[in-house]
Image (cartoon, rainbow, N blue to C red):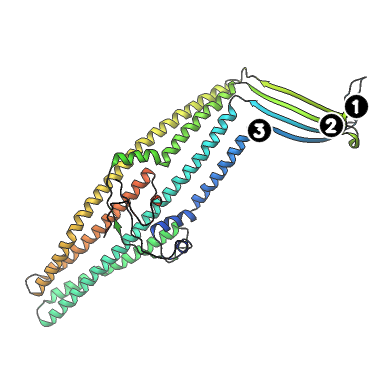
């Protein structure tokens, strides 16, 4: 059973407030705001409108064309043999023309099919762009949570170092600690202070990147109230691969491209086939505009036009050969993507396994590292251990905590990459919930 990675979302402002630019954002609101403001998504939405209009244009080829025409022509001389009408000096004409394409070799049918498929192409392209934006939003959001966790670890390590330095300084005053130990402890504090500053800068840099993704000013304040957390999923590569083959938008685009090129062959072959049109007209013609709408000036006509191609200089053959080559090319491109999807899913599963192993190993060691630091501090206070033992224990604890946080971030990103590889969006899940049986774990 698939168990989704998720974050616990604390109750914050209402969604409307957040999407309108509030400072408190959860992951879902971040993604939705990115969708709303992203220029590429807005452009692609217009492409869907254009594709819908193209369908209407292609449909118009099946409908009759009716035109009302009015003309006035002045002829200087009109040659009028006996009983033969050749026109008027002041020639007024009102004509209602009708035309209908009965058959044009299947070109119109293929063109309409391509237009409908093109609409699906634009819709899948929009979904692909949204998945790309969602992946970037998750990458920056998870990165921001990692930066907050890194800052917390750096502050804790600095506070521990300062507290130990004060203890050693008091012991030095009492004559129970050497000056070397005091200086060594002070140097440790100096080494940790830049790490806190760097962690703060990383947070601000990630906020700026995230604001840019949201199309907001980089100075817009932002706050997250979630902790870096994860939930393990059951890794079923075959199941993921089946989902990818069904849902990955890029694969759907390739399939649609194959279908479009298939109809392109039919469009090219229409040059071999006959064309038939129906034509009709109803008109009034007179030299007197005020007296032209009467029976004597009325006329009508109707006819059928048939065009059978005999020889067109091999142009149709060239079009057919080109269309067939594009069709074969589209199928090869689709097969190539199928292979790449399998590689992407395999990499995502390996990434999940690797980061899960890191998380488990580091999480089990945190308790031991804390206990080791406690023992080192007590032993040093009692003169059993040296100062370096305490400093090493502090560094080890901070390093294990950083490794755990990095492992959780890597796990979240591996899941984000898996979702992108199979064409899955976390917005399809209820906000702030996971599948039944998931158990959330914090850094």
Label 2: few (<14), some or many (≥20) within 10 Å? many
Q: Residue furthest bottom?
A: 174
Instruction: Check disc 1 and report its element: helix, strand or loop.
Output: loop
Q: In front: 289, or 315?
A: 289
Give the mark nearest the N terminus, 3 or 1: 3
Q: Which residue is drawn at 42% across and 30% down?
A: 331
Residue carrying label 1: 78
Give the mark nearest the N terminus, 2 or 1: 1
Residue carrying label 3: 63
Q: Dots 2 and 3: beta carbons under 8 Å?
A: no
Give the mark nearest the N terminus, 2 or 3: 3
Where 184 sits versus 62, above or below? Answer: below
The image quadrant where one finds the C terminus is bottom left
- Disc 2/disc 1 C-alpha distance (Å): 19 Å
* Pair 3/1: label in front: 3
Label 1: few (<14), some or many (≥20) within 10 Å? few
Q: Which numbered marker is on residue 205?
A: none
Where 187 sits versus 27, above or below? Answer: below
């Amino acid at each position: 059973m698939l168990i989704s990675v998720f974050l616990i979302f604390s109750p914050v402002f209402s969604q409307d407030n957040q999407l309108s630019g509030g400072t408190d954002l959860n992951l879902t609101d971040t993604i939705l705001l990115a969708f709303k403001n992203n220029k590429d998504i807005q452009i692609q939405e217009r492409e869907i409108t254009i594709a819908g209009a193209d369908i209407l244009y292609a449909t118009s080829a099946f409908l009759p064309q009716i035109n009302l025409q009015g003309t006035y022509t002045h002829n200087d001389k009109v040659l009028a043999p006996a009983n033969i009408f050749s026109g008027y000096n002041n020639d007024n004409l009102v004509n209602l023309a009708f035309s209908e394409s009965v058959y044009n070799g299947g070109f119109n049918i293929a063109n309409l099919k391509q237009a409908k498929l093109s609409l699906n192409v634009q819709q899948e392209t929009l979904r692909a762009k949204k998945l790309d934006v969602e992946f970037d939003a998750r990458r920056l959001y998870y990165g921001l949570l990692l930066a907050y966790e890194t800052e917390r670890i750096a502050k804790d390590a600095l506070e521990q170092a300062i507290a130990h330095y004060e203890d050693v300084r008091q012991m030095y005053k009492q004559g129970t600690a050497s000056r070397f130990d005091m200086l060594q402890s002070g140097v440790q504090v100096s080494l940790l202070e830049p790490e806190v500053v760097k962690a703060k800068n990383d947070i601000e840099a990630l906020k700026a990147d995230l604001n840019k993704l949201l199309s907001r000013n980089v100075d817009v304040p932002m706050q997250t109230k979630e902790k870096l957390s994860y939930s393990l999923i059951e890794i079923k590569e075959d199941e993921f691969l089946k989902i990818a083959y069904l849902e990955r938008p890029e694969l759907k685009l390739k399939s649609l491209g194959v279908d479009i090129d298939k109809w392109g062959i039919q469009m090219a072959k229409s040059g071999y086939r006959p064309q038939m049109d129906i034509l009709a007209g109803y008109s009034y013609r007179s030299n007197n505009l005020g007296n032209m709408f009467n029976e004597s000036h009325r006329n009508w006509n109707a006819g059928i036009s048939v065009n059978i191609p005999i020889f067109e200089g091999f142009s149709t053959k060239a079009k057919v050969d080109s269309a067939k080559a594009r069709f074969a090319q589209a199928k090869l491109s689709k097969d190539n993507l199928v292979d790449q999807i399998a590689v992407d899913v395999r990499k995502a599963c390996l990434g999940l396994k690797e980061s899960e192993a890191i998380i488990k190993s580091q999480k089990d060691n945190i308790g031991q590292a804390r206990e080791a630091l406690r023992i080192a501090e007590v032993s040093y206070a009692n003169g059993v251990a040296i100062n370096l033992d305490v400093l090493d224990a502090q560094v080890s604890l901070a390093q294990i905590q950083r490794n755990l946080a990095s492992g959780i971030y890597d796990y979240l990103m591996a899941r984000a990459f898996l979702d992108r590889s199979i064409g899955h969006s976390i917005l399809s899940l209820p906000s702030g919930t996971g599948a039944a049986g998931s158990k959330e774990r914090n850094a």
